[in-house]
Image (tube, grey):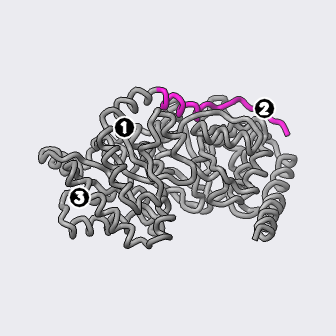
Amino acid sequence: MMRRQSLIDQAIIARNLLQVVLPLHRLRASATRPILPETPTRFAIIAGDVTDPASSLGDLAMFSALMQSLRAQNPDSIFTIIGERRQTIVIPGIGETPVVPAWSGKTGTRAFDELIRQHHALFVMGADILDGKYGAALVQRIVAYCNHSVALGIPATMLGFSFNCNPRAPAVHALSRLHPKVTVNIRDQPSLDRFVRIVGIPAKLCADSAFLMPPATDSEPETEAWIAAMRREGRTPVGVNLNAHALAPAIAQVGMDKLIDHIAEQLRHAGVQNRLAFLLLPHDLKLQSGDVIMLKALESILQQKGFAHVRYTSIDHPDKIKRLTGQLDLAITGRMHLVIASLSSGTPTLSITYQDKFEGLYQHFDLSLEHTITPIQCLSDEFLRKINDAFMHRHDNRARILSCLPRVKALASRNLAISTCDPAD
């Protein structure tokens, strides 16, 4: 098995060398970069999901935060998203934004070279893709594009990302060969420590760029009216998100139906004991993500168990979700960017942990890891204990979050720094 994986890894590296690295090297030698205006206005962004950049609300939150922040610095800023196919997506606070195909094969490589020469800077949506968890070939191409960009004198920045304990070998191979002029931002201290130890190059500490996304100004009348009605009844509104990705180990052990039934029973007990009301919030609307299926099933089971103070709401804009999280007392979720939306609104969270992502996030806010839970713990009465404990400490945790938030937002702003970059190989 290890031998087979090693052969796969070597094939990924060799294919990237032939389809991306060598063609880019030849293209650098064959053309000169057009002279652009001195004021940076044109920004290219590599999507976290190049196949469908708008499919994840977390990715949309990062797009929105980056673009709105850059446009605040320069109202004339223009953005191009790099993906696999030509389309237009809507970014909260920005509007329609073009996605240009500059990814697959040698054709994508040539398209990227032509595109980047027309831009002042390149940004990469780091998030959780750069350890190779979602594809090592993806990381290989990202690194090649960043190296090509700075070699042309165009600054390249990897936006704050996390880095797990077991990165893919081709990802480490590529990252260790990053040009020193590429800016590497890591979104938490444990990830930074792992990255420096495993990859062997320097990087900078920041916080996730999504902390900079403002909440929506327009209300969600029906949902906000329900939250207000629950409070009038003396109930405390709590957000809940379930998804197949974070809960995969528990689903593998007992199946999705038994897991949802157990979670429903634990939530019912917590709801009765603490007079809670549950707002069920999907944060990824793709079918395979499981958010929608699991939450609709959860709503139905809770009602069958006689707990009526539950509402499923589907919202496809991350800034609107951030607005709602600010009206809750607690959020229970395994979605990283739903946790970020909650924390940046001052709302405490109980996080279902996976992929070594949450320890560092909690560290930013001096929050106890007692307010996290593993997927397997969700199968036991430990889930109820964790909910009750997080609920009991919600006021103290809110005060701690709000006191740390200015510092965390300042760390998130480090993603916006664009280094000067002279052409060099």
> Which sits in the foreground, 344 or 254?
254
Q: Is mark 2 on a helix, strand or loop?
A: loop
Q: What residue type is labelled 3?
A: Val
Q: Which residue lies furthest to the left in this view?
A: 233
- CA gap, disc 1 and disc 2: 40 Å
Q: Nearer the viewer, mark 1 or mark 2?
A: 1
Q: 10 Å neighbourhood of mark 2: few (<14), some, or many (≥20)?
A: few
- CA gap, disc 1 and disc 3: 22 Å
Q: Where is residue 245 in the image (x, y as percent from the top left)?
A: 50, 62
Which one is earlier in the sequence, the residue at label 2 or at label 3?
3
Residue behind mark 1: 345
Disc number placed over residue 310 in the picture, else none: 3
Q: Examine the structure image and report whether residue 422 is included in the region drawn in magenta.
A: yes
Q: Which amino acid does label 1 sit on?
A: Ser
Q: 10 Å neighbourhood of mark 1: few (<14), some, or many (≥20)?
A: many
Q: Is residue 149 above or below residue 381?
A: above
Task: Classify the position of the C terminus by image quarter.
Answer: top right
Q: In this view, does 285 lie above or below 365?
A: below
Looking at the rendering, the stretch of residues picked out in magenta corresponds to 407-425
Which one is earlier in the sequence, the residue at label 1 or at label 3?
3
> Which sits in the foreground, 313 or 193?
193
Q: What residue type is labelled 2?
A: Asp
Q: Examine the structure image and report whether residue 326 is included in the region drawn in magenta.
A: no
Residue behind mark 2: 422
Which one is earlier in the sequence, the residue at label 1 or at label 2?
1
Disc number placed over residue 423 in the picture, else none: none
Q: Position of residue 209 (x, y in %)?
A: 52, 39
